[in-house]
Image (cartoon, rainbow, N blue to C red):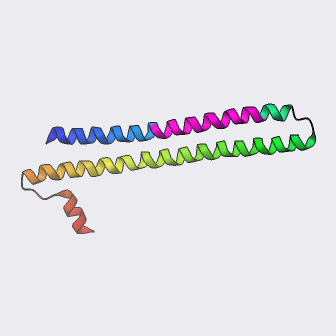
Amino acid sequence: LLSAGTRAEDKLDDDCEVDLDNLTDIFEAKKEDLEKRFEQVKMELRQAPDKASLESRFTDAKDLLHSLEEAYREYHRDAVQISKKHPQDANREAIEHHDQISTMFGLEQVLSRREAST
């Protein structure tokens, strides 16, 4: 039972790490694409042949910078959400494990006691 609790805790930690890694991979790919597109628009901005092209490329550059900022904000929001959820999940897992051990010894379960008081 003790090793099952440790395995469950390890799996929870690993799942959180995988979630954060996947989120980072998605963000990095999106960021890389936006940065490449921005570099291209910067080049076109420098080489704009007339005022209309210049204004158009400038608008494109601002839009890409805005998209990049939004990507950073989205990544940060999601990473914080995953990071905040992990301790809650770990606490619940620890209580469930404690309750399994308590049941073996015929003791009152923490989780059922908390649920009964709410």
Q: What residue do we see at 44% from left, 40% from top? A: 20
Q: What residue do we see at 86% from left, 31% from top? A: 47
Query: For residue 30: magenta?
Result: yes
Which of 36 and 18 lies nearest the eye of the viewer? 36
Which of 110 and 75 lies nearest the eye of the viewer? 75
Relative to 109, residue 82 above or below: above
Q: Is residue 4 left or right of residue 15?
A: left
Image position, residue 101 (x, y; %): 13, 49
Please name the predominant secondary structure of the magenta segment in the image: helix
Q: Which residues are magenta?
A: 22-41
Image position, residue 32 (x, y; %): 62, 33
Which of 9 and 118 lies nearest the eye of the viewer? 9
Image quarter of residue 37: top right
Most extreme residue toward the left is: 105
Which of 47 and 7 lies nearest the eye of the viewer? 47
Image position, residue 93 (x, y; %): 26, 49
Relative to 92, residue 65 above or below: above
Q: What residue do we see at 56% from left, 47% from top? A: 74
Q: What residue do we see at 22% from left, 68% from top? A: 116
Query: For residue 11: magenta?
Result: no
Image position, residue 87 (x, y; %): 35, 47
Tell me the quarter of the image containing the C terminus: bottom left
Q: Is residue 39 left or right of residue 107?
A: right
